[in-house]
Amino acid sequence: MKKVAFIITKSEVGGAQTWVRDQIKLFDGEIEPIIITNQQGWLSESLPDVQCVYVPKIESRFSITALLAIIKTIKLNKIDIVIASSANAGLYSRLAKVFTRFRCVYVSHGWSCLYNGGLMKVVFTRVERLLSLLTDTIWCVSQRDYELAEKSLHISSSRLSLARNAIFVHPIKNCSKNHQDTSNKLHLLAVGRLAHPKRFDLLINAVKDLENVKLTIVGDGPNRERLHHYNFDNVHFLGEIKGFNDYQSYDAFILISDSEGLPMSALEAGINQLPMILSDVGGCHELIDTTNPNGILVSNTVIDIVNAIEQLISIKSEFKKNAKIKSNDFDIKEYKSLYKKIIFG
């Protein structure tokens, strides 16, 4: 049985952390997993039987202490495969390969060096291209990420793999009378960290004057206090809810963001048969069927978001019907053989 280390910068709730949890569950009994992350948190608590090694300085852009701790962990545990799921984790895992042998898989959940590089974008993209030479395969979770890796980062296709994100199917719950179809209002759900690159500020500004729309936000993060100052009757904050799966209590899902890979929260909404309104960034367009639309893509402007909400309200039943059909495309078990090929080579 192969020993596989999953390295991720933070253990808090998030899309990349959900991805790690689901991979470990998917290959239960087929791998011996270990998690390397910053501290105890949502991820370690979600997998209490999995060994965790905490390296607090992994949060630093670069720390010799963190690098040495990761190398030591890989050697002591005789790790065969390392799967890195964040930019920092990708840096440390690939530098570690200079000092010890293992199969290195870097998972791109959206190219932060392109989206968030700012003035350092050119430097970060060159670093990413150099690091690709130390990587056995770079796992792109969306077609868009794959194209960016080839065309913008100029990474050789021989080092790229493409396998879309997917999630476990959960039993569909009965719709809650508290939210769905009890009034003429559209009950929108947004799930995510209250932090960049999510644009909850823009979303709230779009819905605040829509009397027939109620927005519920699930999540926590550094922007919580600022966002809570938006005091509108139709916007409700539920905070972080561990293991949230109450998607079926709402009419539709909305995600407004400046950058994404292939968002796990949108996949959760999709598999729960919810119509979606998504920012047209990253791989979000891959979740929307343009022929039989299960949702709407928007630019990040108030007017575009408002228009999308009004369009969804006008033909809600049609979007709902298409969302139910599309939900079959998001089952992780259908992708297991492809994932296995990428992980094991």
Image: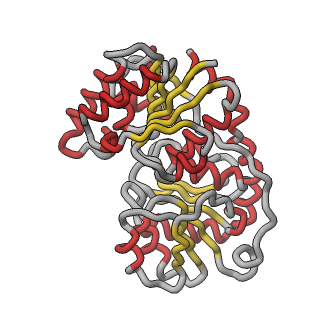
Measured from the top left, where is residue 343 in percent x and y?
56, 22
Between 163 and 41, the one lying in front of the other is 41
Between 88 and 32, the one lying in front of the other is 32
Which image quadrant for residue 69? top left
Q: Would residue 214 appear left or right of 85 to someone viewing this image?
A: right
> Does residue 263 show up?
no
Quadrant including the N terminus: top right
> Does residue 29 show up?
yes
Residue occupying the far left of the picture? 119
Measured from the top left, where is residue 27 in percent x and y?
67, 30
Between 322 and 181, the one lying in front of the other is 181
Which image quadrant for residue 128? top left
Q: Would residue 129 appear left or right of 277 to someone viewing this image?
A: left
Q: Could you tell me which residue is drawn at 36 percent across and 37 percent down? A: 87
Measured from the top left, where is residue 296 in percent x and y?
57, 56
Q: Could you tell me which residue is drawn at 53 percent across and 69 percent down? A: 217
Q: Could you tell me which residue is drawn at 52 percent across and 74 percent down? A: 237
Q: Is residue 102 above or below residue 178?
A: above
Quadrant including the C terminus: top right
Q: Could you tell me which residue is drawn at 45 percent across and 73 percent down? A: 204
